[in-house]
Image: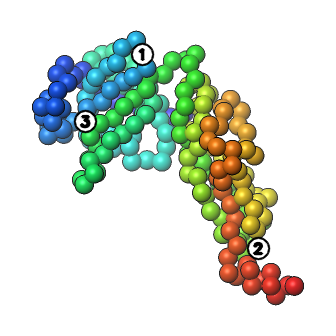
Amino acid sequence: MKVFELKGEKRSDLGKKATKALRVAGNVPCVLYGGEENVHFFVSEKALAKLLYTPHVYIVKAVVDGKQYEAVMREIQFHPVSDKVLHIDFYQLFPDKPVVVEVPVKLQGFSVGVQAGGKLVLNTRKLKVKSLPAQLPDELTLDVTNLGLGKAIQVKELAFEGVELMNAKDVVVAQVKLTRAARSGDAAKS
């Protein structure tokens, strides 16, 4: 899994006024959970751009006042009007403790159903996986070569080494939908 380095400074004052002053100065308040104690810190809003606005999932190496933590993003709060980042929660990783993370899905291959005139649709862009941090994949690759017209791939049909899928078993990940052209082609054959 890709690693993103993030430098922050510890917060001493946690009240509303101090948090508002941080945001006005172009910083984002953050909290790191899951360790012996919660770590409250802030980072520059500009430093977060490459972490937030990407389809990739990262393990974050947060350096807070010289101390290094490995973590994953758990929750992001955005302003309802301006879409500015208000707050981020991180969850600390430990090598022997499994973690649940959403990982992007990538489709691979030229589907038989698409060749017959159907349309390939990715219904679920990310799947929740549970795994040890060392085994977390960058992405989950699905081979759709044998996927025919009107057929779908569900979570229960998938298995990946070293990870457990946490989504409901009947969730459709990808499918080939019938198009008007494919329906008229089927009608003309019969």
User: Sequence order check: which comes first, mark 2 or mark 1?
Assistant: 1
- Residue at screen point 45% across, 30% down: 72
Front one among 9 and 149: 149
- Secondary structure at badge 1 equals loop
Residue beneath label 2, please? 116
Viewer can see residue 3? no
Front one among 100 and 44: 100
Q: Where is residue 55 in the image (x, y as percent from the top left)?
A: 48, 48
Residue contact at pointers 2 and 3, CB within 8 angstroms: no
Residue contact at pointers 2 and 1, CB within 8 angstroms: no
| Three-letter amino acid code at the position of disc 2 | Ala
Nearer mark to the viewer, of 2 and 1: 1
Q: Residue furthest top?
A: 36
Residue beneath label 1, please? 35
Please tell me the numbered disc located at residue 62. none
- Residue at screen point 56% across, 51% down: 125
| Three-letter amino acid code at the position of disc 1 | Gly
| Three-letter amino acid code at the position of disc 3 | Val
Residue beneath label 3, please? 28
Q: Where is residue 108 in the image (x, y as percent from the top left)?
A: 68, 54
Colour option used = rainbow
Q: Which residue lies furthest to the right in this view?
A: 190
Q: Marks 1/3: CA distance? A: 21 Å
